[in-house]
Image: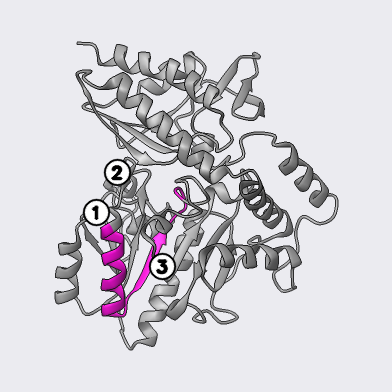
């Protein structure tokens, strides 16, 4: 089906932060498969672990116990200080599980029509429920009727949350991205997250954080919420957890744990041995190679360099983000920069029409980051020339 506006290039191999096309041309990967290839391409330890697992067992039904699944669940619970993990295959599946958890939680509170607060410009997936939770009319158009049960408020606006609390007794949860990726690399204030945690506790709501794009070390901590020193009731992960192998997780704590019982939810492929080996190996390499601290320092270097290079350029608005999740906002639509960068051997992305999005692999070196800047900054300046 014609569902993608594909760029005119085919990649045949990768190594580290680099990709090669069918013609042998080399490209610097500033996108990492949209925050997926955490360890870059063909990481030797990752490749060896998956090769060994493929030789043993790829799939096993969830009607049986799986040691790798248990090890990855234990690892995630230890890193998050949360208690339960459901494994699936993608971010939208993880968010579907979170939505179902919230509705079950609401019904157990005696609420017949549970509602979830969601944000303007949010993106939670393309299934009908996650599409309905998403705050982008362009991706919703044509798929009505949407799923009911969502109350939308502005991002980073606590007063709007409080107003809903006063007037809507059906609310049972808040679902929010600590950093909106598709929404333009917009970051929640730390104080907002801390106050949101308090409001959810006061109202007996679930605080559900979508870290599908910003989790797994990308911001310089394991999870973006850790910058605020809180713990959510539910968190969803996917993308970077498997370094390219499809995996998603919905993690629960406190009053959100213990809600699902056998038969309430499931997945044929979720948590299979190959995916769990990919997740466990990714986390172990991030830990062993201290890549979280590297993401923080390299992200600071890139952001500082961008501001230095672009400050005062007419049409440049700001650089924002955290760690290696970076947005460069211009005052005009800039989608054509994607093809211009591609022609010069650099992979980038534009989101929210006017925000250049950088999501490089966490193994990118400072020298490679400088190469990225040496290509991108002149391109932006030339694009913005009157």
Numbered label attached to residue 347: none
Question: Which residues are drawn in magenta?
Answer: 191-214
Q: Which residue is mark 1?
A: 155
Q: Are marks 2 and 1 in contact (CB under 8 Å)?
A: no
Numbered label attached to residue 232: 3
Q: Which residue lies at the image location 60% right of the left edge and 54% below the top edge?
A: 247
**Circle 1 Cα neighbour tier, 10 Å, few/some/many (<14 / 14–19 / ≥20):** many
281 within the magenta span: no
Q: Which residue of the protein is positioned furthest toward the right in this rendering? A: 55
First along the sequence among labels 1 and 3: 1
Discs 3/2, front: 3
Numbered label attached to residue 138: 2
First along the sequence among labels 3 and 2: 2
> Exactly how many numbered labels are in the figure?
3
Q: In the image, is 262 to the left or to the right of 159?
A: right
Q: Is residue 294 above or below residue 101?
A: above
How far from the left and from the top, in percent, is residue 20? 63, 21
Inter-mark Cα distance, 1 to 3 = 18 Å
Q: Which residue lies at the image location 42% right of the left edge and 67% below the top edge?
A: 231
How far from the left and from the top, in percent, is residue 1? 51, 38
């Amino acid at each position: 089906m014609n569902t993608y506006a594909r760029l005119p290039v085919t990649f045949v191999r990768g190594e580290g932060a680099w990709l090669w096309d069918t013609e042998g041309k080399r490209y610097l990967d500033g996108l990492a498969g949209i925050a997926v290839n955490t360890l870059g391409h063909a990481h030797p330890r990752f490749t060896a672990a998956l090769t060994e697992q493929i030789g043993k067992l790829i799939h096993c039904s969830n009607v049986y116990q799986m040691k790798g699944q248990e090890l990855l669940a234990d690892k995630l619970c230890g890193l998050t200080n949360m208690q339960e993990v459901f494994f699936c295959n993608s971010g939208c599946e993880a968010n579907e599980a979170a939505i179902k958890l919230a509705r079950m939680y609401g019904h157990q509170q005696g609420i017949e029509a549970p509602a979830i607060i969601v944000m303007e410009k949010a993106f939670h997936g393309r299934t009908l429920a996650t599409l309905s939770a998403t705050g982008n009319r362009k991706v919703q158009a044509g798929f009505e009727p949407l799923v009911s049960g969502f109350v939308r408020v502005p991002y980073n606006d606590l007063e709007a949350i409080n107003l809903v609390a006063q007037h809507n007794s059906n609310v049972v949860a808040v679902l929010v991205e600590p950093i909106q990726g598709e929404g333009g690399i917009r970051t929640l204030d730390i104080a907002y997250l801390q106050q949101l945690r308090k409001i959810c506790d006061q109202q007996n709501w679930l605080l559900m954080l979508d870290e599908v794009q910003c989790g797994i070390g990308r911001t310089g901590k394991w999870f973006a919420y850790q910058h605020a020193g809180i713990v959510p009731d539910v968190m969803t992960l996917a993308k970077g957890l498997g370094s390219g192998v499809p995996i998603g997780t919905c993690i629960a704590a406190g009053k959100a744990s213990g809600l699902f019982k056998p038969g309430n939810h499931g997945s044929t492929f979720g948590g299979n041995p190959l995916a769990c080996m990919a997740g466990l190996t990714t986390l172990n390499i991030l830990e062993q190679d201290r890549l979280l601290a590297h993401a923080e320092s390299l992200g600071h270097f890139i952001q500082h360099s961008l501001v230095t290079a672009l400050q005062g350029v007419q049409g440049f608005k700001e650089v924002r983000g955290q760690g290696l999740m970076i947005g460069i906002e211009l005052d005009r639509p800039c989608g054509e920069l994607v093809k211009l960068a591609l022609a010069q051997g650099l992979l980038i992305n534009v989101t929210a029409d006017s925000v250049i999005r950088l999501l490089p692999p966490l193994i990118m070196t400072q020298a490679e980051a400088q190469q990225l800047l040496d290509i991108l900054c002149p391109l932006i300046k030339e694009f913005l020339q009157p």
